[in-house]
Amino acid sequence: MQGDQPITEARIKQALVAVAYVISEYGRTEYGPLMERLERELLMYREARDPMSRARAILDEDQAAREKSI
């Protein structure tokens, strides 16, 4: 059952992308509060990690963005 899985940054991002898609593609603006909640949850999740983990995540995201732009 999916509810038994641990909450991870990837799962929060996946949910955020899904909600953003529904809002953008179908105009379902009533999901705006859910998107805002997921954005807050993602920030709180990131802030709760230790500095080393946060630094590595920042560098990983930067590297991925650089590779995409090539």
Image (cartoon, rainbow, N blue to C red):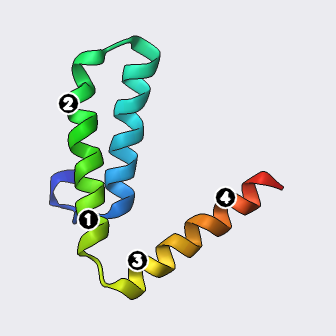
Q: Amino acid at mark 3?
A: Arg
Q: Position of residue 45 (x, y in %)?
A: 26, 65
Local SS, label 2: helix
Q: At 30% across and 64% down in the image, what residue appears?
A: 8
Residue sitting at the far top: 27
Q: Amino acid at mark 2?
A: Pro
Q: Is the residue under label 3 in contact with that under label 1 (CB below 8 Å)?
A: no
Q: Which residue is mark 1?
A: 45
Local SS, label 1: helix
Q: Which residue is mark 4?
A: 65
Q: CA distance from mark 2 to mark 1?
A: 18 Å
Q: Which residue is mark 2?
A: 33
Residue 64 vertical position relative to residue 60 in the rendered view, above or below: above
Q: Amino acid at mark 1?
A: Tyr
Closer to the chain start, of discs 1 and 3, is: 1
Q: Indicate which disc residue 54 carries.
A: 3
Local SS, label 3: helix
